[in-house]
Image (cartoon, rainbow, N blue to C red):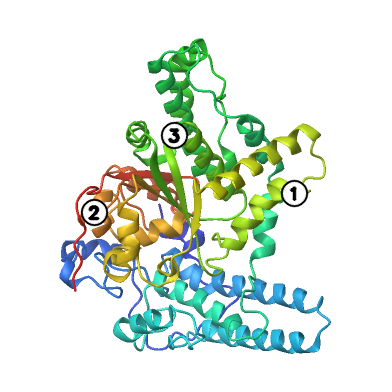
Amino acid sequence: MSSEANKTHPSAKAPQKTVLNLGNLPPKLKPSDMKQSASQYPRTPSRVNPNQPPWPAYRGYHEYSFAHATMGVRLPTILGKAIDDVWKTLNQEYDEERIVDLVNCIHRLEDLMGDLQNNSKLRPIIDDGAGDVALWNKEIAKFFRGKDFMNAPWLFAEAYKYRRLRECFSLSKYWVDYDVFFRQKCDTFSRSNQAVFELSQRFAEPVKAGGDISAEAQLEKDKLVFLELTQVCLWGNSTDLSLLIDMTEEDIKKLQSTGGDHLAATEKNILGNDLHKLADYVMTIKNGRVDFVLDNAGFELYCDLVYADWLIQSGTCSQVIFHGKKIPWFVSDVTKKDWDWILNSCVYGQLFQDATDAEVESLRTLGHRWKQYEKEGKWKYEAHPFWCTGYTFWDLHSEAPDLFQHLSESDLVIFKGDLNHRKLTYDCHAPLDTPFNQAIGPLASEAGAPPVASLRTIKSDVVVGIPGGVGEKLDEEEPGWKISGKYAVVLLSQGRKGETPVYNN
């Protein structure tokens, strides 16, 4: 691939709309610079910290990386749309005190936009009474003093921007819980009617186990459904739902001979593929507990709920715990408001104008069952403050030992999506074939670490756990493959479940 062709890669383009004052940044780096210094890495655990990941961090001034496009174009664009959303809300208000309070929120948003566009230093978070302020400011003071948006590690700088966004409203009187992204999160669900009803009509009726099929056939049936549902959760509505819940033993035999080809076809873009290892492990869980660390609201959350419903009905789980965010985060991440909205929309909503009575009823049936799970404690929504900090999950054991202890009691923790994968792997320039266990560090190696699965469509630079040569070939043939969302990984770490966690005083 010529250097001229590489310049057309979206993540290599310089910002078009935003001019950044870069100040005295380090020299521009190229991917080859990273490869030449690879022998110095990974850093030993004692040398790893948020500003020095195991391998070199992606930073906004790396023009070859998606970090550059994000910090220079995407984040200012997202913030601009957020400001537009607030103006829409203000235009519907009539109480002057509330309006003035919201105008002050807009002023703070505009100040944040100025800091982004001028590449300002990362200042401490203003004390807004939230419990995370001390944790944020400790990290800034210890590791990022004097850093700005472009030379701090991309993951931290991006997370910091969303915490600053929260601050714009948390300092207000009336708008503390305002979510500038709520409208668009709802819209992603209401525009997915075909896929929503495809799933609701297949899964509205309770799963029928046993019957006329043997235990061996039931196990095979469960495994096939699990494989398909896992891909639904991975790809959303781009997968072809081929498996029916009411399969007969003859249907299963046919799938055993032809379904392999179908599943192989849908798996071809899963570059790091532990899907079948994951299925084999899940088939051993009986009346256990699975945790989901959620990613996106809307249709993706709906797919997660269908997945979790099957885990309960199949007898795999007696409890599923969903971990969301306490504040609006990275545009589309699930908050408690999003969780309540989708459950209530399934039961009471009229989102789909052209839906048939049968389609609406199937969605109502799902919604009622899911709300009953919640009432009975079979489903729980939790939002630990650690998920909305600048720390990666390498620091979960040390910075949130209560959360680590809680997760250590799970039979499987499924981390959904790109951001969670970046935090699992420290969002750094690890070699593409780095084993997943090594890439996630303490979350695999610490005593008590639970089994961890990452379901992630690849939408940013960090990629681990894929066979040697695969990424290099894609670099030549599809230079934008790391941000296209066309490829994915399903990776599994067995952890050290059953061992007693050890915490430093």
Please state, as top left, top right, bottom left or bottom right, where the C terminus lies in the image: bottom left
- Look at label 2 and name its amino acid: Gly
380 lies above or below 68: above
User: Which one is closest to the eye, mark 1 or mark 3?
Assistant: 1
Label 3, residues with CA under 10 Å away: few <14, some 14-19, many ≥20:
some
Alpha carbon of mark 3 to alpha carbon of mark 2: how far?
31 Å
Residue at the spot 61% in from the left edge and 72% down from the top edge: 77
- Look at label 3 and name its amino acid: Glu
User: Which one is closest to the eye, mark 3 or mark 2?
Assistant: 2
- Look at label 1 and name its amino acid: Tyr
Judging by the rendered image, the residue that carries numbered circle 1 is 348
Residue at the spot 61% in from the left edge and 40% down from the top edge: 369
Q: Report the disc number at residue 448.
A: 2
Residue at the spot 50% in from the left edge and 68% down from the top edge: 69
Number of labelled discs? 3
First of labels 1, 2 by sequence position: 1
Under circle 1, the secondary element is helix
Task: Spot the residue most to the front.
Answer: 376
First of labels 1, 3 by sequence position: 3
Alpha carbon of mark 1 to alpha carbon of mark 2: how far?
42 Å
